[in-house]
Amino acid sequence: MNLDLQEKTVFITGASSGIGAAAARVFAEEGAHVAVSYHRDQDGAQAVAESVRALGRQTCLCPMDVSDPDSVTQAVAALPSPFDQLDVVVLCAGRNVVTPFEAISAQEWRQVLDVNLSGPFFVAQALAPRLKDGAAIIMVASVAAQTGNANHMHYAAAKAGLVNLTKSLARALAPRVRVNCVAPGVTRTPMGEATVSPDYPRKNLLVQRFAEPEEIARCIVFAASPVAGFMTGATLDVNGGRYLR
């Protein structure tokens, strides 16, 4: 299927590893130029940028702390052409900490919500003036938004907020910009595998395996593409049947 992404400009947070890195590569394979945003992992971000460049697409590195609105504002102001005008924004930066309810400190609660909920808001707000007519924003949430989780409820609560932020932002930016959400299940990334036990797929997933980052990335790319042009305010569940168990 032709997703009509040739020469489109894409900005991805959390693009130095995991789902964000996979999305950067898939967008580039579809012919898009990709700005690689990251916080600390410069080596990972550089490797992703090189893979985008190897596919003949333009790229740039954009370091920012999504939880800090000043950092976001400064990073966005420094974006070079062609990324000063954007067709797609993917908000994939996230942080998960496994801590039982009784042990979650006020500081940890704030830090997890700052990255996973406030961060996407800050980035979307900063980039909105740079979005072209017909642009798309994709939030990356989690199946935890729907199921809850006793051992990382701050993460689950933040991702649930992200699902609602998707709906609210879709209303705010319509009809010029579409806003959708992809809610993955546990994915074979360092963060994903660190949050569950080895027998999790057998017990909890109908497909009885983890997702590969590329599987989630392809869903993100589809939702961002003009092919999904009638979809906005929606959450695409990609969780191997976790929500049914």
Image: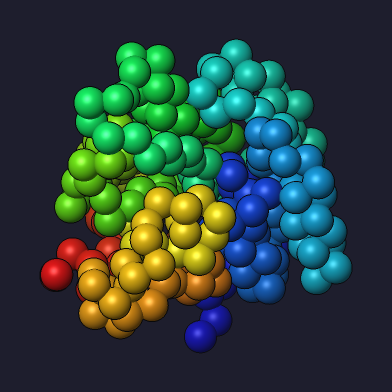
Residue found at the very far bottom of the displayed protein: 1
Residue found at the very far left of the displayed protein: 244
Residue drawn at (14%, 70%) of the image:
244
Query: x, y (%) of residue 174?
Result: 31, 42
Question: Is residue 175 visible to us here?
Answer: yes
Residue drawn at (22%, 45%) of the image:
149
Left or right of 156 on screen, residue 92: right
Picture colour scheme: rainbow
Q: Is residue 26 above or below residue 147?
A: below
Left or right of 14 on screen, residue 33: right
Query: x, y (%) of residue 238?
Result: 33, 68
Foreground residue, 64 or 96? 96
Foreground residue, 21 or 91? 21
The C terminus appears in which quarter of the rendering? bottom left
Task: Tell me where residue 24 sits by quadrant.
Answer: bottom right
Residue drawn at (66%, 29%) of the image:
64
Query: x, y (%) of residue 118?
Result: 40, 26
Query: x, y (%) of residue 202?
Result: 29, 77
Residue drawn at (23%, 69%) of the image:
204
Q: Is residue 3 above or below residue 45?
A: below
Question: Is residue 160 visible to us here?
Answer: no
Foreground residue, 204 or 224? 204
